[in-house]
Amino acid sequence: MTPASKVLVTLDDVYEAAERIAPHITRTPLIGVGGPLVLKAEHLQTTRSFKLRGVVNAVARLTAAADGRQLRLVAQSSGNHGRALAWAARRFGHQATVVLADTAAAHKVARIRELGAETVLVPAGRRGPATADLARERGATVVSSDDLDVIAGHGTIALEILADLPETGLLLAPVCNGGLLSGLAVVAKALRPDVRVVGVEPELAADARASLRAGHRVTWPVERTYRTVADGLRAPVVGAHAWEHIRRCVDDIVTVTEAQITEAMARLTERYGITAEPSGAVATAAHLAGAVPPGPGGTVAILSGGSVPPGTPHAPATKRHGHNEGEVHVETSTPVDIDEPMRITDERVVATFDAGPPDIGALWELCVHLEWDRKAAVDGIAAWLGDPEGLRVLDAACGSGFPAIDLAARGYDMTCSDGSPRMLEYFHANAAALGVDVEAVQEYWEKVGDRFAGAFDVVMCRGSALPYAGSWDADAEPDREALRRSVEGFAACLKPGGRLYIDTTLEQNLKDTAPHRTTYPSMVIGEHAVDLTEVVTTDLDARTRRWDSVLTVDGVEYRFVRRSHYLSHEDLTQLMHDAGVSDVARQDVAGETYAVFSGTLRP
């Protein structure tokens, strides 16, 4: 699948991968656990490991090139790569076969089969040849953990880390085939050359360290690598592509003992309520063992996986799955299976579902929680806004209050408006609960310019709200003329030289005209069992998009239909220009999940 002429992944490859996989993966949080150590919680991915990022990127690219054909995909795996392939194959409508060692963990084999993939068990040393044989016999495409698209997908982890924790000074990552370490190193050395990137592997499977010391790839017999408890790190040699990245970009590779691995697992469980599989705990083990001096800046260890047998207990959860602030986002309780529903304790979300049958506002409140890291997004928007002193900001699509309430709490002079009375009810409740005094009024976008003519330094319409012009509260077809009137209304609120900030759907998502289904992990919100599935259908002829959401609360289904404009980036840029806004350009705003465009009102 990888072009023979290409050897290294570039930073642009990783940025493209980030857009491509965003609709399918979880933007995992950082978890502060005291001192300089922060964990990147990849065990919270849908398939319980980082592997989903790279595999989704590879399968998405294969799908785009297949022109509607169903593909046969095959891969060798110790479990997590195969589970990711099975998930991606089902998501994109393909067939998957996973070749595993006959000693593979039974729960990992079972999870792969549950996702509809075929599994083939062979002796550990036969996985590679058996995969090649199956690909040849069936005309299947091999999705290798050493593929450049897979490496690029894994690199998106570093993009998120450096956006959320800019002061990062050290990245610690487990090493198997080397794809994760390679992707991290590409991004870190391109964006922050001073960040040290260090791989960690078990002492009993230290082929990568041996390779780095020797200056060439060193192979260990599987009889040696299979001694470690870290079953996801038993590869006998790093991949050929991964090696080219490792030898150029990685600062060091260290090892940890079996006792240090199990001690790290116990520490994570007992102190922080986190169940990591052995392979997922090795980076934490290296930090705890002092294998790598911390140095300046924060240390981020990749908690790469949490695929454990059913019934593996947690200790009581005492730490939030968030950044180093006191916000509570997701926590687990004892006892719990890692595959049990995600527990959400965010007070804003819980209050919404406790209030009664959910409406469109409840659905939005939940989606905000699932799709954004609130603190990271507010940090990024605040950085874009700059000093709040003397800055008047209008959030013209304030919805239930994110991020306007948070920005007001940070000292920004915020005025808020929204066309939906129901969303404003949520806004006022959230502002009151947080003790923030901020003005919020009902006003339609076409008329907002009459109400606030020339009053603001910045006007924002975010959350990909603009495409819903004229259709948010009603089961009605969007009116494209409403787009023009809305953007003109925003511009009319600006002082000369003021800035207009609008975000919209990522370009990659607009290109996919096939119905796109997203099934979120099962959740427990307060005392309520909740499931959410959304299907997005794009009609290029009508230039509309339709969202069909099924929200199931305590066994009762609630269905919501939203219709929006198909708003290309070119269309948005032109609308802003036509409204008198100059220098319109795409902006890189950390923490945002949509494409942000901004420009300045012409005098």
Image (cartoon, rainbow, N blue to C red):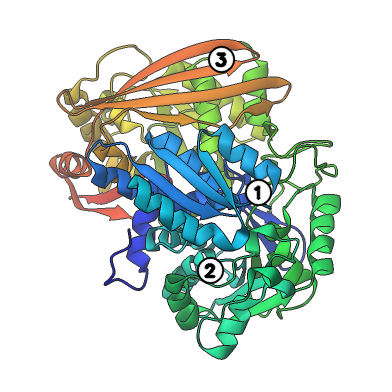
- Of badges 2 and 1, nearer the viewer stands 2
Residue at (39% x, 25% y) in the render? 535
Rendering coords of residue 235 (x, y %): 59, 66
Residue 29 seen by the camera: no
Q: CA distance from mark 3 to mark 1?
A: 26 Å
Vertical side of 397 occupied by 52: above or below: below
- Residue that numbered label 1 is attached to: 322
| Number of marks present in the image shown | 3
| Mark carried by residue 358 | 3
State which quadrant residue 452 falls in: top left
Three-letter code, disc 2: Gly
Q: In the orientation shown, which residue stands out farthest toward the bottom?
A: 214
Residue 110 seen by the camera: yes
Marks 2,3: beta carbons within 8 A: no
- Residue that numbered label 2 is attached to: 178
Residue at (22% x, 44% y) in the render? 569
Q: Which tag, 2 or 1, sits closer to the chain's start?
A: 2
Vertical side of 474 occupied by 531: above or below: below
Q: Which of the pair 503/256 is nearer the observer?
A: 256
Q: Which of the pair 48/220 is nearer the observer?
A: 220
Marks 2,1: beta carbons within 8 A: no
